[in-house]
Amino acid sequence: MFVRRSLAFYRKGHEPITFCNPKEESERNLTLATKLHQKAEALRDEAEALKLELQNAKQEKLNKEVARVEAWIEHLLIKQTVDKNTELLYSVEEVMPLLRDGRFSQEQVQKMFDRICERGPPQSRSKCSPILALLVDAAGKLDELDREENPNKRWSGVVERKLRKKLFAMDWNIDLEAENKE
């Protein structure tokens, strides 16, 4: 029996139509499928490596932000660290000018508030740590300044109220972020 390996028929205006031996065609499809599978595996590995790299970059950025906020807390609120569990704090009268002259925004104060809440025991209005109370009271003193007297134009004048509202919510286990999204 005579088997043609490849025949090409041409129709006017079309590509040639070729016929191959079925065994050759299945081998070619198998090789093509293997190559595509290998490419897919390589792409999956590359995607996984990029995902890990992205996660590491996000974690590194978060660590830098935490370190920056910790530095603000150390600069503004803590006069001296005696040991791991003992810190001497500034007074409200000393912190308020530092907040004002340092031109801290309400977002920065909010980040310090959140960081203090994260690193210590659960905070609330009734169980407020001294460092958190100092921050809230200093924000209140700065809120009392008239807008004209305060050189920090980024200060809205309602920071203490927002911080006390958060403390109240923590006291009653209310999730303010969930309510704000609704």
Image (cartoon, rainbow, N blue to C red):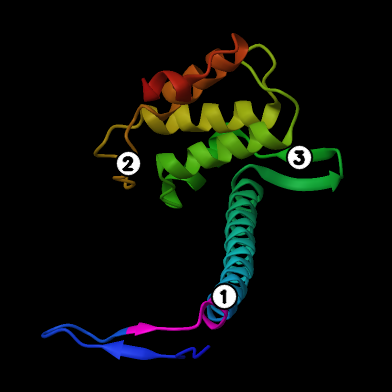
Q: Is residue 1 above or below residue 49?
A: below
State the image quarter where residue 170 is shown: top right
Q: Residues within 10 Å of mark 2 (few under 14, many from 20)?
A: some
Residue 121 position within the rendered picture, expressed as x and y whole percent measured from the top left = 75, 26
| Number of marks in the rendered image | 3
Residue 39 disc label = 1
Q: Nearer the viewer, residue 3 or 108?
A: 3
Residue 150 disc label = 2
Q: State the CA–CA distance, disc 3 to disc 2.
A: 27 Å
Report which residue position mark 3 lands on.
88
Q: State the CA–CA distance, disc 3 to disc 1.
A: 61 Å
State the image quarter where residue 162 is shown: top left
Confirm or deny contact between disc 3 and disc 1 (CB under 8 A).
no
Residue 82 position within the rendered picture, expressed as x and y whole percent measured from the top left = 85, 45
Q: Give the residue at the far left of this rendering.
A: 12
The tag earlier along the polypeptide, 3 or 2, is 3
**Residue at point 47% right, 17% down?**
165
The magenta region covers 18-26
Which amino acid is tagged 2?
Asn
State the image quarter where residue 47 is shown: bottom right
Q: State the CA–CA distance, disc 2 to disc 1.
A: 63 Å
**Residue at point 63% right, 17% down?**
124
Q: Quadrant of the C terminus?
A: top left
